[in-house]
Image: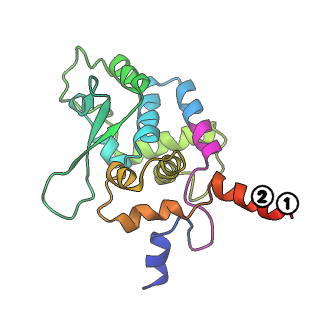
Amino acid sequence: MTANALRAGSLYGGSGRRKYLTQDERTRFVEAARRCERQDVMTLCLTLAYTGARISEALALTGESVEASAGFIAIRSLKKRTRAIVIREIPVPDALIACLYRVHGLDAASREARLWPYSRCRAWRLIKGVMNDAGITHGLHATPKGLRHGFGLHAIRSGVPLNLVQRWLGHARMETTAIYLQAMGEEERQIAIRMWAD
């Protein structure tokens, strides 16, 4: 296996820098998104933070993707190698659904229209702007992909079973999802603290 292949299945890049947002950075990102003057940018950022969607998957969402009564967003997996259409349902907070309805007028508007009519490049820059507002320093982690990795870690540390994290992130293989088990969690730190007490 090549060094590049090993790095791809890791939470750290080739130079040893992390690829994910920490819990503190993730919290600051969500707070900065909520303060954002542009409501459409706020909803995009919150949707990414609460679903772990890839940026292209989020940009493909329409009003029909938001299932208010069931409390989830249906995301079409765009990175599948087969021609089969794969939709994953990701539970999200009721407050996010209410915000999507309010900002995007989902009650009155055509539910077939895309929620965010941005190009991928434009959306990437808008998200980076919110990260800058959140005080997240530049690096591999300060990207929409870093936000996705942060979602995976947050889910694992919150006790979400690995198979659900795999489904929510749209991973074809469990080995891909298992990278989130690499990061040290609070339980591991508490074990180490007990070790240092002697």
Image position of 16 with respect to 35: above or below: below
Q: Name the spot of residue 127 as percent of width and height, x first.
A: 49, 41
Q: Does 193 sit left or right of 45 as displayed?
A: right
Q: Choose between 159 and 48: the one closer to the eye.
A: 159
Q: Secondary structure at mark 2?
A: helix
Q: Name the spot of residue 99 as percent of width and height, x first.
A: 40, 21
Image position of 83 with respect to 110: above or below: below
Q: Secondary structure at mark 1?
A: loop
Query: Which residue is label 2 attached to?
Result: 193
Crowdedness of circle 1 by 10 Å Cα count: few (<14), some, many (20+)?
A: few
State yes or no: discs 1 and 2 in contact (Cβ < 8 Å): yes
Q: Does 119 sit left or right of 21 as displayed?
A: left
Question: Does the stretch in magenta take in 196?
Answer: no
Say which quadrant the C terminus sits in. bottom right
How far apart marks 1 and 2 lie (CA) works out to 6 Å
Residue lying furthest right: 198
Kindly identify the amino acid type of the residue bearing the numbered disc 1: Ala
Residue lying furthest top: 108
Say which quadrant the N terminus sits in. bottom left
Residues in magenta, as a range: 14-29
Q: Residue at x 32, y 52 (%)?
A: 167
Image quarter for residue 92?
A: top left
Image position of 70 with respect to 85: above or below: above
Q: Does 73 sit left or right of 144 as displayed?
A: left
Q: Name the spot of residue 28 as percent of width and height, x first.
A: 62, 37
Kindly identify the amino acid type of the residue bearing the numbered disc 2: Ile
Q: Choose between 47 and 159: the one closer to the eye.
A: 159
Query: Which residue is label 1 attached to?
Result: 197
Residue lying furthest bottom: 1
